[in-house]
Image (cartoon, grey):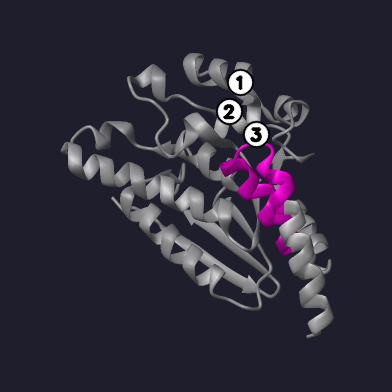
Amino acid sequence: MSEGTVRLAVEAPIAKVLLDAPPENRLTPALVAALASTISRVDGSADVRAAILSGWGGTFSSGMDLRALEALEPKPLLLAAQLGQDVAWRIEHSEKVWVAAVEGVARGGGLDLALACDLLVAADDARFESPEVGEGWIPFFGGTQRLRHALGKARAREAILTGAPISARDGHAIGFVNRVVPRGRALSASESLAGEIAKRPWPAVRAAKKVLVEQLDKPYRNGFLLEAQYLAQLVVDRKKGP
């Protein structure tokens, strides 16, 4: 069985990254490693300002095959989990702005990858699921932490402990979905949103993202210091000129 691949299409300033492992875009260690390599290519492209992460064939990703992972010894299993965590972290902390375009389902590790993106556009019939506990596991791509930030403490605990799916509309009401669009339009709507952001003054966009993301890693008060530091650096860089 093919483990799928990751497709990269660049039309500067936008890059499109598509998980291509039909029919569910199920994640495997090999596919996650391919995604890591693709992220490096996107990050290394000076012409790219924003990247879209989506799934081929009408679904985002059904996540890792947990039964397949059960066959692994503890050390390879730990490495697989850490690779997934690293990939989601790199998306989250990339200097590019990442937009998740979600059709169908974003489940388990697929949900973690979607939430690692800066913005999320979802088809109106999309759903978000954290099924791991029901199968005897826990989220392991960083989901226990990322869901808490995205959903809030109460909703994150419910989503993780019950596995109940969250609809696109509920995701929008909670605040982790930015835009809800008709089925089949998530990718095109994400391209429009990414293009809108890519046209803005890029040093300011990049600095704003750094503050928004880095503050998550620090106590609340430190976020104000980050704001001041990056503002000062922006002013210095603007005075220097291009």
Q: Which amino acid does label 2 sit on?
A: Arg
Residue 117 is covered by the magenta coloring: no
Is residue 215 magenta-colored? yes
Q: Nearer the viewer, mark 1 or mark 3?
A: 1
Q: Position of residue 197 (x, y in %)?
A: 79, 61
Residue pictured at 50% horizontal, 50% vertical: 89
Q: What SS does tag 2 mark?
A: helix
Q: Which residue is the site of mark 2? A: 148
Q: Which SS does the magenta portion mostly show?
A: helix
Q: Specify the amino acid type for callout 1.
A: Lys
Residue on which disc 3 sits? 126
Instruction: Please name whichever residue, 185 or 12, is drawn nearer the observer in this view of the structure.
Output: 12
> Is 199 placed above or below 131 here?
below
In screen coordinates, is 181 left or right of 128? right
133 with respect to 167 (left or right): left
Could you tell me which quadrant the C terminus lies in? bottom right
Q: Which of marks 1 and 3 is nearer the N terminus?
A: 3
- Tell me the magenta residue range: 206-226
Count all numbered tags in the image, as a single digit. Answer: 3
Is residue 172 among the parts visible in the rendering? yes
Secondary-structure class at tag 1:
helix
N-terminal of the two: label 2 or label 1? Answer: 2
Is the Cβ of the residue at disc 2 closer than 8 Å to that at disc 1?
Answer: yes
Mark 2 vs mark 3, foreground winner is 2
Comes first in the chain, label 2 or label 3: 3
Q: Write down the quadrant of residue 64 in the picture.
A: top left
| Horizontal side of residue 25 vs 189, given as left or right | left
Are there few (<14), some (14-19), or many (20+) residues within 10 Å of tag 3? many
Given the image, on which type of amino acid does mark 3 rest? Ala
Which residue carries the number 1 mark? 153
